[in-house]
Amino acid sequence: MSVTLPSPTLPSPILPSPALPAFVESVSAAGDLPPVGPPGFSTAQVHAGVLPDPGHGARVAPVHLGAGFVFADFDEAAARFAGETGEDEGYVYTRMGNPTTAALERRVAALEGGAEAVAVGSGQAAISTALLGLLRSGDHLVAADSLYEGSRGLFRENFARFGIEVDLVRDARDPRAWRDAVRPTTRAFFAESIPNPRNDVLDVRLVADAAHAAGVPLVVDNTLATPYLLRPLEHGADVVVHSASKFLSGHGGALGGVVVTAAGALPGTVANLEEQTAVLGGASYAQRYGERAYPGYLRALAARLGPTLAPFNSFLLQQGIETLSLRMARQSASALEIASWLEARAEVDRVDYAGLASSPSHALARRYLPRGAGAVLAVSLRGGRPAARAFLDALQLFSRMTHLGDVRSLALHPASTTHAHRDPVELAADGIGPGVLRLSIGVEDVPDLLADLRLGLAAARAATPVSATGVAR
Ligand SMILES: *Cc1c(COP(=O)(O)O)cnc(C)c1O
């Protein structure tokens, strides 16, 4: 078996994990077994991406905390700089590449079915780096309106200041709405696979087709689905971004972000990749890296902008990913059970969870999320803000936090926190009214979580005038 080593110019190529190809080859060669396909997700999540530690044989990817890496001599220094970025054959400086981070990148790329990944310091850094790789001043982005507030703010305020215009598509399921938003300067589409708290699941194929008809790539934020539930690249998306701080890590102990790119060139032309640049000796990224021009450019862009992922966080994120399938299966199943239970409670007006048959996204969830609809749901209390306040304050097991994807269950009142700056009428129209709470279901035992929610509902009931709900005390 030959292990494909990283090219001298770019780190983190396609899954050069020695364990997996050797395993597949040996099992196939055993003859009496049918040929096996690629290893399953749970196998890949613990084996993909790790290169053996030649020094000591460490099984887990070692943590390389160094800022920089030694050059043996004058020529090696020049050669590594000529490669421009660090990789397993020779790193330069951690902002340009680090072996612990490279192991994380290979693993996430493998799990998403992508060709390559670039890890950065947070989910927000992943989104801004991925999009600034595609866009420049004067360009236009079309995004689904159902967005993480951090992304909405980035697009509406910061991108506007950079001269990048953004249009938000209200009905992401209407292909004409995407088509109508396209301008001659449109350079990318952006959407989330499972937006929260509404859980209005993305029709990835529909939006990818609309993007490709416009000659631009589709970037999908896959944070809430994770590759265990959905692999957007398999449905036509060109780029996937993650906040690794959430489900990928699961432990809530580190921030991180990852951009994953599909194999092959991006649709359309990206000016950033075509422009000649001095650091490549007058070549363009497209000329130098061919189909890998975009991840090559992203790596250089991240090295310049500087949202470097700390190597220790790379290590922590890998530890989390090793149990991703187990957590997602458990947390999705628990979320469905809890959503069904909440939906039947008198204090509850509505539950937004795509796993429920009552959800307008249920058909899309069945198509795109056969392993589960994720672990984040929104529950709308009849008693409005006073009920939501009483509910939240009565919880003992759920943590009141703006975070999600943790092994612990978390609760948040979006209208008074993450979305407090938004117009209340607009918010209510978006399904984020004053009585809405966002719940991120952890791995705790469901009966314990239900007991805690019962405390919340009892408090909500006590805080709600009977006239407001018609619900008897
Ligand atoms: C949290 C989150 C982000 C931002 O990620 P950070 O790691 O907090 O920077 C982006 N998108 C979605 C969907 C998120 O939930």
Image (spheres, grey):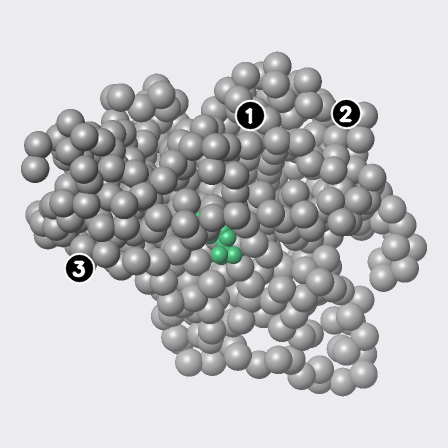
Q: In the image, residue 8 lies at what x, y percent?
A: 70, 61
Q: Residue at x 43, y 52 (%)?
A: 417
Q: Which disc, if any, is residue 183?
A: 2
Q: Which residue is mark 3?
A: 396
Q: Which residue is mark 1?
A: 170
Q: Residue at x 77, y 78 (%)?
A: 77
In front of the other: 289 or 155: 155
Mark 2 vs 1, N-terminal side: 1
The span from disc 2 to disc 1 (Cα, nearest Å) is 17 Å
Give the left or right position of residue 244, taking residue 131 as reference: left
For numbered disc 3, what is the local secondary structure?
Answer: loop
The span from disc 3 to disc 2 (Cα, nearest Å) is 51 Å
Mark 3 vs 2, N-terminal side: 2
Give the left or right position of residue 135, taking residue 192 as reference: right
For numbered disc 2, what is the local secondary structure?
Answer: loop
Q: Residue at x 57, y 81 (%)?
A: 66
Res. 31 in view: no
Q: Mark 1 Cα within 10 Å, few/some/many (few <14, many 20+)?
A: some
Mark 1 vs 3, N-terminal side: 1
- Residue 48, image quadrant: bottom left
Q: In the image, residue 160 lies at what x, y percent?
A: 73, 44
**Amino acid type, callout 3:** Gln
